[in-house]
Amino acid sequence: DGGEEDGEEEDGGEEDGDEEEEEDEDEDEEAAGKEEEEEDEDEDGLPIVRNEDGEVEYAPQPAPYDSAELAEVQSLLRGEDTADDASRWKPLALPPPPQGGGARRVPAPLLGDLLYVAGVLRAFGRQLGLGEVRVDALDAALGGGATTALAMRLHVSLLRLLFEPSAALARSHPAFCHALRNLSALTWAEALAEALLRLADGQATAELALAVRGLRSGEYHTLPPERRVLAARLLAERAAEHPSLRASLERRAEWYEAHDWAWEPAMLLGRLQCWPPHRLLRWEPLGRDRHGRVYWLLDGSLWVQRRDASATDEAADPSLSGGRPGAGVPGVATVRYGGADLQAVAAA
């Protein structure tokens, strides 16, 4: 009898082992299922999947709105607001611009240019090898009193994109070619000076000429913020036109075509602005209002840009007179609301 009992116990142990194996198999299957559900990304950071034939296809995202939201936005786009609907939308009266402009280092007239450079760097951070560039970090790089790591990295990355140290360049500009081949903390400022002259193509402004002279005679951080921003904007503009980055935009457009929902309502609802910048065709603002003000929500701050406002508008809304015209965008003023000032905007 004892032997039989032992045999039964052994059989029970085998059953327990079988159950454990089955549980392990189930867990493996669940893990594999989760891996299949997780979408991969291509080199541009766009979602991709493999079809039944093993070919790679773009993975469309679900619509970022429901049917009720879509219907409401479409009625607004068609101008079909009823009196009751219109009464829900009150005009936004912004509080006066913050005194002193917060802790930013770049002067107020240059904030429009700062946001432009930030937009290019954020949109192509993967291609440039910069990752996510925060506005405050860029502000410190272009307006601070020291040469930051970001200042060197962004200029080195843009120089490598725009200029190839070819044999022809080595013959015509040997010093510039040598600097490009050996970009480092010691050589990038000199390479930047030569690059600015080449990008100006014989039409350098007085400010750009002074920037080149300053780079050749002193340290980068000794340049006034106006000249550092000018140089960064020129590089960013040329980078945005570069074939490799334009090709990246074309691939994003192909990915967009894989979706069957409307993009304009999604943008107006502020849903696309939550997507990573490298998935957007344009650097989308948060929205616009009837005064022509453009709103950007970046790094926890609200940035408001406005074009030339009429005297009537300024009298009705004192916030329209805040800021000064931007250096690179004539007639544009940019105001930043953060912290308590942003809470005041939200309350309005």
Image: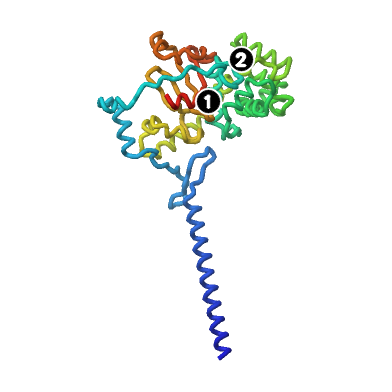
Spatial separation of the CA atoms under disc 2 and disc 1: 23 Å
Residue 319: % across, % down: 45, 16
In the rendered view, tell whether residue 309 sits above or below residue 250. Answer: above
Element under label 1? loop
Element under label 2? helix
Q: Which residue is drawn at 56% across and 18% down?
A: 101
Q: What amino acid is found at the position of numbered circle 2 in the picture?
A: Glu
In the rendered view, tell whether residue 123 sits above or below residue 331. Answer: below
- Residue labelled with disc 2: 226
Residue 247 in sight here: yes
Foreground residue among 225 and 260: 225
Label number found at residue 91: none
Residue 21: % across, % down: 53, 69
Q: Quadrant of the N terminus?
A: bottom right
Q: Is residue 72 left or right of residue 183?
A: left
Give the mark nearer the N terminus: 2 vs 1: 2
Which tag is nearer the camera, tag 2 or tag 1? 1
- Residue labelled with disc 1: 338
